[in-house]
Every structure is written in C-alpha cells, then in structure tokens.
C-alpha cells in the first residue's frame, strides 16, 4: 500500500534490493506459449520477422495477421513477452520491443486480466535486466518507460520506482543506463508526484550525472532534462534543481575534450530541449552557459553540426525567454557578430553556373553556415524584438562597416542581415528608412554580382515587410533603381531578381503610385521577356502579371502590345524545360484578363481557354508545375468573364474536385521501428498524430497539400463570382469541403474551407430566389454547414484560423437569412460556442497579466509582444460580436427568449478592466438590442442603465460604443426608454460640451453622441421635454466630421427633418437657414454623405430656392465661404 500511495518515497524501496534481482515472470504466464508446439512458437517469431520483410505483399499480410492477433490482448500479450524474453534473433527482439510499445495501448492493457497485467510488467523488468544487446535493451527500456507512463496514472505499477532506484545503484552500467531511460519516460505523467520527492530524485539523478560511464551520464542528462521540462509549471521547484547544472555541463565539456562530438551534440540537444520548455532553469548559470555556447560556435576545430547546435541553443533561449535574454550582456554583445561571422562563410562558385539558376544563394540542400546565420538573425529579430536587434545589427562596426568592406562577402553578409531582420525590426527600420534605402540601392551597382543580387533581395524583402510605407515614400528611388539594374545583361540572375523585386513592390503598392512608371517598368519587363534567358523570362512574366494586378484598368493601354506575345509563348513553350515558364504565362494571361476586364479580354478568351483545355487534357507528369498554375488560371478567367465562363464549368470542375479530394497523408508503418532514424524524403513532412489507438506517424506529401489548398481556394473564387451559376456543383462541393473544416494537417485548407461556406450559402440562396432550387435544398445545405462550422469554431487550435471560422460563421448566417439555423437548439449551440471562445480569450488575458506580474524580466518589448497577442484576441472577440449580431438579426424570436441566460456571459467583458474588452462587450449589447428591434424592450431595464454608466467611461472607445447603444435604445426602446430619458440627455449633452470633444481622441465618441441625440429627437420626442433646445444642439454640432459611417446616417436624418419641415427651422428661417445651408455645404463632397444623401441635399437646396423668400436664401448663401458656395452651385447645376 505504501508503494502505491508514495511511489517516489525512497522509504518505499526498503527491503526490496535482494528481491529486485530475482524478478521472474510467473511460470504460468508463459506456460501457454512454452507448451505450444515448436511450429507455433516459430510461427509467431516468423510473424514478427515478416514485419521486417522488404516485400510489400508479404509484409502487408504479416501486418494484417499481427493486427488480428492484437485484437485478442489476452492471447497477444504472452506471445509478445515470450518473444521479447526468449527469441534468439536480435532483430526480432528489437522489433518486438517497438511493436510492444505501439500496440500495448491503454485500451489493450485494460482488457488484460489482472494476472496477465502483472506478468506483462514483470516480463518487461526481466527483459531489461537480461537483454545483452545494447540497442535492443534501450528499446526495451523505452518501451518499459512508455508502458509505465501509460498505466501509472491509475497507480498500477507501484514496483517501477523502487526498480529504478535500485537499478541506478547496480554495479552493471547497462542497468544503470536503463534506469535513467525508464525514468525519463515517466517524468511527464508523474510531475505532480515528483514535486513531493525532489530530494530523493535529485540524489538519484545527481549520482547518475557523475557516473564513470559516458552512456549512463548521457541517459541521466536526458532524464534530468525530461524532469525539468515536466516540472516547468512548478517554477519554485525548478529553481531548487539548478545546482545540478554544473554536473550537467560537465558532461558536455568532457565530451568536447575527449573529443566525442556525437556525445557533445546529444548533450547540447538536451540543453535545447530544456530551453524550449523551461529556459529560466538556466538563469543563475546563464552567463557561463552563454560563454560556453559562444566558445563552441567559434571553435573552428569542431564539426559544423556541433557548432550549429550551439547557435540553436542560444537562439532557442532568446525565443523562449526574450525578456531574460535582453538582460544578458554577454549574449547581446556577441550574438549578432556571431551570426554575421557565420554568414561570411560563402562558397565561391563559378559565375557561369551561378547565373544559370534563379535560386537563392544557399542552393545546397545541406544546412550551410550562411543558412544558420540568416536563420539566427531572423528568429532573433522576431523574438528579442526590433528595438534590441536593430540597435545591435546597426552598431557602427557591424552592418554599416560591413557594407563598406572591401571583401564582397562582408557586403553580402550585411545586406543579407538587413533582409533577415526586416520583419522583426520593421518599426525601427521605418524610422531610418531613407538612409537604409540609400544604402541598399547604392549596392545595386556593386562591382560583385552576388552583392548586387543580395542588395536586390534585401530591397524586395523590405518592400514586403515595410510596405506600403516604403512604396508610398520612396517609389522615386526604388523603381528607377530596379529598372536600371535590369540592364545587367552579363548577369541574368541579377536581372531575374530585379524583376522579382518588382513583384514585391507591387504587392504593397497603390495603383496611383505605380501608374506614372508604367511605360518604363513594363518596357523593361517586356524586353526581358522577349530577349532574356529562361530564368529571366520566368520572373519578368510574373512581374508583368503583378503590375497588371496592381494597376487594373490602366493596363489596357499595353494590352494589345503584350497579349499577342503571351499567346505565342503559350503556343510555343511546350518543352519540358519551359513547363514553369508556360505555367507562369497562364498566370500572367489570367491576371491581365481580370485587370482589363471582360470587354477587352473577351476577344482573346476563347483562343486562350482552348489552350488551357488542351493543357488540361494532356497527360501531365505528376511534378509538372503547369497543373497548379492551370488550376488558378481557370479561376481568374472565371472572374474576368463572369457568367460567360459558366459553359466551361464542366471542363474545369471535375479535375478541380479531384485536386480537392487528393489524399495527402499516408501512415508510415515504421518497418524497423526507429522512426527517428528514417531519413526525411524530399517533398515529405512527417507529423505525429494522436488517435484512438495511440500515437501514429503520418507522412504528408507537401506538394499534394499545396495542390489541395490551391484547389480549395479556387472553389471560393468560382462560387464568389458565379453564385447561382454554380448550382449544379453545390452538393458535390459541399460534401467534399465541409469535412475539410476539420482537416488537421494543413491550416490553409481549413481556412479556404471556412471562406467557402458563406459563398455556398449565398449561391444556394440566389438559386432559390430565382426559382432554380427549393427551400428543402437550401435547408439541407445550411444544416450540413452549420452542424460542422459551429463545432470547429470551438475545436480549432490555431487562433488565426479560428478567426476565419468565426468570420465564415457570421457571413454564412447573414447570407442564409431568417431562421437559417432552423432550430432553437442550434442557436443555443452557437451561443455556447461563442461563450467558449470568449472564455478562452479571458483565460489567455488573465494568463498574460499574471505572467507580466511574475516575470522579473518583463520589459517594454515584452509588453509589445503581449499587446500583439491581445490585439489578436480582440479580433476574435470582435468576430464573436459579428456572429452574435448576425444570429440576432436572423433569429429575433429565439434570441429574444434565449439571450437572458447569456447576459452575464457577455457582461463579463463589460466589467473587464481592459477598455477594448469593455468596448467589445458593450458593442455586443448594442448589436443584440439593434437586431431584436422592438423585441429588445424587455432588456431595457437591465441594459440601458449600464449604457448610461459606460457613456462616462474614461476610455473614448468605450464611451463611443455606449452612446451608440443609447441611440439604439431611443430607436427601439418605446415606453421603456422614457423614464431614463433625462439621464440619457444629460450624458449626451455632457459629451457634446466636453472640452476637446471634436479633437482626434474624442471626436468619434462625440459624433456618436450627436447621432444618438438625433434618434432621441426622432423616436422619443415626448420624453425629452424641450424639443427645440434638443434640435438646436443637434444642428449646432453638425456636420459630422470624424465617424464617416455614422456621418452618412446623421446627415440623412437631418435631410429627413428638413424634408418634413422641421418646426425650429421654419419658425425662424432667417436664423436657422444659414446654419442649415452651411452644414449641408460643408458635408458635400466628403465621405459623410453618399450618393443618395447628396441627391436629397440637392432637392432640399432646390426647394429652399423655390419656397424661401429670396432675401433669406440669398443672405444665407452669401454668408458661406467661396469654397462652400462653389460646392452648392456645382451641385445645383449638375
């Protein structure tokens, strides 16, 4: 009993030492195996052996037989244990240990009888002791640890810890090593139990860390690392373990001195694993740790793999504990110089060969020193923050000095550094952008082509990371420099990269900025396209496409010159080496088609689509890039042609759906059981996935995933453009795409699936409205979609994708219209989903606050990181509000009854100390009241006082939301509003009269207060007492200047008052007509009046001319400034 309750108590092992070495499997357990015929025994060994067979057919038969056997755990367990203990074949024992670990799952073990369970455990312990082959023994130890971890939660193996403690004291080194291997597997499931036994565990591990045998020390280091990681949430207990660090480090230094670099790398990897989960474990020893890592990185006698791991350790510490590392002087002084020194190791290559490819400078598949240095800088900038890294990189002796160095490799390294840190240092780079642009552009004329390439690469990266500021401010420097360097005919790779930088420039560029440069830019790009080598043509044609996408209709001027060339290329570029170029030609043609529009493109469309169709009908190789380009090109042509494209759907949809349905995952069977020893294949990524039967290794073909995601995105394009034209494809597409909302392997597929859901609903609704389908069809579709979409909103693990799911949810409800969720139960399920998302956000918010308080290293950059995370969470809450608004508007009756039980849930936001949360919570109340209309009157006694209260909040954004809600209450509150009308009017007046009410900080709140006042005047006239005073206050504030959306509504309300003959104005026209005319004149031509309001203003001014005494209208007009007079005159003459 004591062992079951205190499995880590060293007292629990008293009296067990002698018995320990006598562990034997009960004879009855194996008797069934031993009494079998020799043939049966050999059959089972042969079955395991067959799992190693290289013949797929024979191996598959063996796998099926083995799986059938495992369906009978009571039969399979003795066989597995017997083979593990008795088979003379080392390979069979090794695979048996692995299969044991894979197939003896919790469900398997639970089906065993208690005697069999006990015998399995004893068999494993005996196998660990008796196995002579080290590789097999380690597998058995790993399996023993895994099984123990699996069943220890229920306290089902009280003997395991005494075994570990006694084995650790064994005179046999292999047994001491095995004890550490087993313990390392237990740590993560027994962390809470370990807390109470840290003293004995420290003694256990401390002794093992100083073992005379290297293998034991390394396994002890792994066990210690696992324990530290497992205890990462218990910070005070981790702190008590830090005195083990010197012994841990000594293992690394001994391996380096021996030298045994493989052992050294193993040790560094253990430190990295700790840094990933518990970086502050190293705090008290951080400076010597950093110095040791730096010494390893700079030790030229060490293998690159060892040095690169030391870099990884430093970077991982920066990523996982940036606030702590920002205070480490040794680290800060050395990390960027280290990275730059690594980047100076650039292989000299033949320039003819270099110019034959458009790939990056780091062509080799093996990790190079340049790769490591660049990766280091990129990750440092993103983790430590721009403020820190920018100041380190632009230290006078680093990037600035490197840029002027006579050795081209230094200049190359400096430019590479700029491009790598640009994303993380974007804020700081924008503050020094003029100087940085000049430095980079100056290197476009560098004497060395590879430096010129690096300069263009840096410019392209800055165009992406610092856009659109760079494009807006420095287009005059960047575009001429890029077009000039396109003339470097001796270096096609430089020309190619210049064209690529134009692509980056256009992606963040306003149309009006690029248009003045079209003649020059397109002229150069066409020259490259017609006269360049293939690598230049491939980038030039994409650049032309990108320019067309940016300037849209302005490209029409160049259409007749460029399109014939593209059509010729489509016809002639048919060789294998030109497949990519031909694919890019399809891309360019389709983007130009969208840019110039249907009218211009239609003349060439049929010829082009015939070529597309011929390509699609051809038997393309699996690796032919044309397939992916064609998928996307069809979609763009559909967007360009609109309804004219519908006849081609029968051609494009079948292969598109085939790509959507492509299977990208294949389970790896693990022939030898050592998954970690398998080399990663090209185009294959492996992931571990938890299933009902345990952890399984899945191989994912990345090209297939990308094709699948592209096809899904194209479906969004087709349905968004063609709507009811897609009716016949709605059902098969929905059957494929709705399940992909849960596609765990690739978030881009899930995001595309989410984006498609509202388009499917919209297409079905449009079809029904035109009599092409009935309500039953639409109901079936919406049921299918909402059943899955509401669930995945909660289940989605990635916040960015979850945001897309929420957006899809509210758009789908909006498109589906009244009662599209069909039942109150589904409405409640949606509200519960929103409640869950909100709860998760509030938990993360609390965790951030607690982390900031507890982190002694918390600083300004840590606060910026938290602010970015909070902003993402605010986006999630805003989308929850949008979904709530949509469901309220479309399910008024149900929400009127159901929202009462969720008042407290959403009220948690309103009472938050964070202004953004209060604003979002109040907006949710506003949306519900507005959506319920008159049905929301029952909530007025609860919500109206809160809105009055928060209209005096210290935060302008909260006041804006609250006072908007006051206007909603005035609109729909009916008699429930009247008792609190005086308080509402008092708050509105206070906001309008507040000092600085029209200032930038307060104007939006004040504009909404004026809007609310207009609604009170219109809908609660009897409740406000002095109506004329209220109207006078309303007029004296106008026009609205800050909140453009609200301004349109307010100015429309003013027009309505004037059209009805506002009594205040008609009673004193000489006083109020000038005021009104001035308001209307100032509003004209701004975004606070739309076309409809403008026409109403015109009619009002015309009626004033016709009905008012001439002296009144002329006097009012004469008081206006000349600019406002001109606006009115122009309007009346239009």
Image: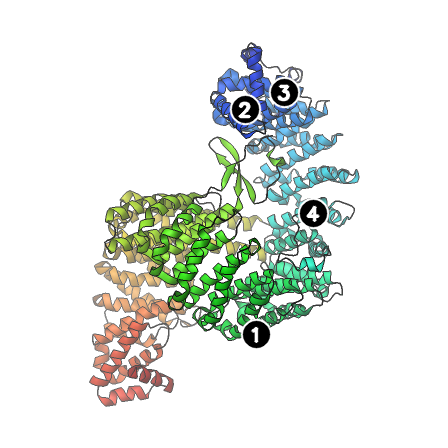
Q: Which mark is residue 731?
A: none
Q: Nearer the viewer, residue 678 or 859?
A: 678
Q: CA distance from mark 2 to mark 3?
A: 26 Å
Q: Nearer the viewer, residue 198 or 566?
A: 566
Q: Position of residue 487 (x, y in %)?
A: 63, 70
Kindly identify which residue carries mark 2. 5
Q: Nearer the viewer, residue 984 or 859?
A: 859
Kindly identify which residue carries mark 1. 476
Q: CA distance from mark 3 to mark 1?
A: 75 Å
Q: Position of residue 1098 (x, y in %)?
A: 27, 79
Q: CA distance from mark 4 to mark 3?
A: 38 Å
Say whether marks 1 and 2 touch (CB < 8 Å).
no
Q: Can residue 915 be seen at all in this image of the molecule?
A: no
Q: Secondary structure at mark 4?
A: helix
Q: Secondary structure at mark 1?
A: helix
Going from the N terminus, do you reach mark 4 or mark 3 first?
Answer: 3
The colouring scheme, among rainbow, by chain, secondary structure or one colour, is rainbow
Residue neighbourhood size for the residue with mark 4, other residues' Cα within 10 Å, grouped as few (<14), some (14–19), many (≥20) = many
Q: Quadrant of the N terminus?
A: top right
Going from the N terminus, do you reach mark 4 or mark 1 first?
Answer: 4
Q: Nearer the viewer, residue 476 or 1058?
A: 476
**Mark 1 or 2: the one toward you:** 1
**Mark 2 or 3: the one toward you:** 3
Going from the N terminus, do you reach mark 4 or mark 2 first?
Answer: 2
Residue beneath the point at 31% across and 66% down: 1012
**Mark 4 or 2: the one toward you:** 4
Kindly identify which residue carries mark 4. 308
Residue neighbourhood size for the residue with mark 3, other residues' Cα within 10 Å, grouped as few (<14), some (14–19), many (≥20) = many
Q: Secondary structure at mark 2?
A: helix
């Amino acid at each position: 009993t004591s062992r079951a309750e205190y499995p880590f108590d060293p007292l629990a092992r008293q009296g067990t030492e002698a018995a320990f070495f006598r562990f034997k499997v009960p004879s009855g357990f194996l008797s069934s195996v031993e009494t079998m015929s020799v043939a049966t025994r050999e059959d089972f060994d042969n079955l395991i052996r067959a799992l190693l067979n290289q013949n797929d057919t024979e191996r598959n038969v063996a796998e099926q037989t083995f799986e059938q056997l495992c369906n009978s755990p009571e039969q399979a367990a003795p066989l597995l244990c017997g083979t593990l203990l008795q088979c003379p074949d080392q390979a069979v024992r090794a695979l048996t240990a692995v299969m044991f670990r894979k197939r003896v799952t919790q469900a398997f073990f639970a089906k065993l009888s208690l005697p069999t369970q006990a015998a399995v455990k004893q068999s494993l312990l005996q196998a660990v002791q008796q196995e002579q082959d080290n590789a097999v023994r380690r597998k058995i130890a790993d399996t023993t640890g895994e099984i123990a971890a699996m069943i220890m939660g229920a306290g089902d193996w009280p003997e395991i810890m005494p075994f570990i403690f006694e084995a650790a004291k064994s005179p046999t080194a292999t047994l001491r090593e095995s004890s550490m291997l087993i313990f390392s597997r237990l740590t993560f499931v027994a962390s809470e139990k370990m807390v109470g036994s840290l003293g004995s565990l420290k003694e256990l591990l401390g002794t093992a860390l100083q073992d005379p045998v290297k293998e034991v020390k390394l396994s002890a280091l792994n066990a210690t690392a696992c324990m530290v990681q497992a205890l990462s949430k218990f910070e005070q207990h981790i702190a008590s373990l830090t005195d083990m660090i010197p012994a841990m480090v000594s293992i690394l230094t001994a391996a380096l001195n021996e030298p045994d670099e493989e052992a050294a790398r193993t040790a560094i990897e253990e430190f990295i694993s700790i840094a990933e989960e518990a970086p502050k474990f190293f705090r008290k020893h951080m400076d010597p740790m950093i110095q040791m890592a730096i010494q390893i990185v700079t030790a030229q006698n060490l293998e690159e793999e060892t040095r690169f791991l030391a870099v990884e350790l430093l970077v991982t510490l920066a990523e996982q504990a940036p606030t702590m590392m920002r205070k480490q002087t040794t680290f800060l002084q050395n990390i960027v110089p280290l990275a730059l020194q690594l980047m100076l190791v650039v292989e000299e290559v033949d320039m003819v060969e270099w110019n034959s490819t458009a790939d990056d400078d780091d062509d080799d598949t093996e990790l190079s020193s340049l790769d490591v240095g660049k990766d280091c800088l990129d990750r440092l900038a993103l983790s430590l923050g721009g403020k820190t890294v920018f100041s380190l990189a632009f230290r006078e002796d680093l990037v600035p000095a490197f840029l002027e160095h006579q050795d081209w490799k230094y200049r190359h390294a400096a430019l590479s550094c700029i491009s790598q840190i640009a994303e993380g240092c974007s804020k700081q780079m924008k503050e020094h952008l003029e100087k940085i642009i000049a430095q980079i552009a100056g290197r476009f004329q560098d004497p060395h082509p590879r430096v010129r390439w690096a300069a263009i690469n840096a410019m392209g990266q800055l165009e992406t990371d610092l856009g659109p500021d760079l494009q807006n401010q420095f287009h005059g420097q960047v575009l001429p420099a890029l077009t000039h360097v396109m003339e470097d005919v001796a270096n096609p790779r430089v020309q190619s990269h210049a064209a690529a930088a134009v692509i980056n420039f256009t992606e963040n560029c306003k149309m009006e900025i690029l248009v003045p440069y079209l003649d020059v830019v397109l002229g150069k790009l066409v020259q490259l396209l017609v006269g360049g080598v293939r690598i230049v043509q491939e980038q030039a044609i994409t650049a032309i496409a990108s320019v067309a996408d940016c300037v849209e209709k302005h490209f029409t001027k160049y259409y007749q010159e460029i399109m014939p060339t593209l059509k010729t290329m489509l016809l002639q570029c048919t060789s294998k080496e030109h497949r990519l170029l031909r694919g890019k030609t399809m891309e360019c043609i389709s983007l130009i088609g969208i840019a110039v529009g249907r009218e211009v493109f239609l003349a060439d469309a049929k010829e082009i689509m015939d070529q597309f169709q011929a390509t699609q009908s051809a038997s393309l190789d699996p690796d032919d890039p044309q397939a992916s380009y064609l998928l996307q090109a069809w979609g763009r042509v559909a967007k360009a042609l609109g309804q004219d494209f519908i006849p081609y759907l029968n051609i494009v949809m079948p292969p598109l759906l085939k790509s959507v349905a492509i299977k990208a995952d294949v389970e790896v069977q693990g022939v030898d059981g050592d998954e970690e020893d398998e080399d990663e294949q090209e185009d294959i990524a492996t992931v571990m996935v938890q299933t009902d039967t345990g952890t399984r290794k899945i191989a994912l073909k990345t090209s297939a995933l990308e094709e699948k995601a592209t096809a899904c995105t194209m479906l969004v394009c087709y349905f968004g453009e063609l709507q009811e034209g897609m009716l016949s494809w709605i059902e098969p597409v929905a059957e494929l795409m709705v399940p992909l909302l849960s596609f765990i392997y690739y978030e881009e597929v899930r995001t595309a699936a989410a984006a498609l859901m509202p388009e499917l609903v919209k297409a079905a609704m449009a079809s029904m409205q035109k009599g092409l389908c009935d309500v039953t069809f639409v109901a079936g579709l919406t049921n299918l979609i909402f059943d899955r979409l509401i669930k995945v909103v909660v289940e989605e693990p990635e916040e960015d994708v979850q945001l897309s799911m929420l957006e899809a949810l509210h758009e789908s409800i909006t498109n589906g219209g009244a009662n599209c969720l069909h039942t109150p139960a589904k409405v409640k399920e949606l509200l519960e989903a929103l409640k869950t998302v909100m709860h998760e956000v509030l938990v993360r918010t609390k965790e951030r606050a607690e982390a900031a308080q507890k982190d002694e290293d918390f600083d300004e950059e840590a606060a910026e990181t938290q602010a970015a995370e909070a902003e993402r969470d605010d986006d999630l809450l805003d989308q929850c509000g949008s979904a709530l608004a949509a469901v309220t508007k479309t399910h008024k009756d149900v929400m009127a009854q159901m929202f009462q039980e969720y008042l407290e849930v959403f009220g948690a936001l309103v009472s938050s100390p964070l202004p953004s949360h209060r604003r979002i919570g109040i907006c949710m109340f506003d949306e519900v009241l507005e959506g319920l209309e008159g049905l929301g009157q029952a909530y007025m006694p609860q919500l109206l006082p809160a809105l009055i209260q928060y209209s005096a909040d210290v935060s302008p954004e909260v006041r804006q939301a609250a006072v908007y809600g006051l206007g909603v209450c005035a609109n729909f509150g009916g008699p429930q509003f009247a008792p609190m009308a005086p308080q509402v009017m008092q708050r509105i007046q206070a906001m309008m009269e507040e000092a600085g009410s029209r200032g930038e900080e307060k104007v939006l709140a004040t504009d909404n207060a004026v809007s609310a006042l207009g609604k009170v005047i219109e809908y609660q006239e009897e409740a406000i007492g002095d109506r004329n005073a209220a109207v006078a206050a309303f007029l004296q504030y106008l026009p609205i200047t800050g909140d453009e959306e609200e301004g349109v509504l307010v100015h429309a309300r003013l027009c309505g008052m004037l059209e009805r003959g506002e009594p205040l104005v008609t009673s004193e026209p000489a006083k109020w007509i000038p005021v009104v005319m001035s308001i209307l004149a100032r509003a004209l031509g701004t975004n606070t009046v739309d076309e409809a309001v403008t026409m109403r203003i015109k009619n009002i001014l015309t009626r004033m001319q016709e009905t008012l005494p001439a002296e009144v209208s002329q006097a009012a007009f004469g008081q206006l400034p000349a600019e406002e007079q001109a606006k009115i005159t122009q309007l009346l003459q239009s």
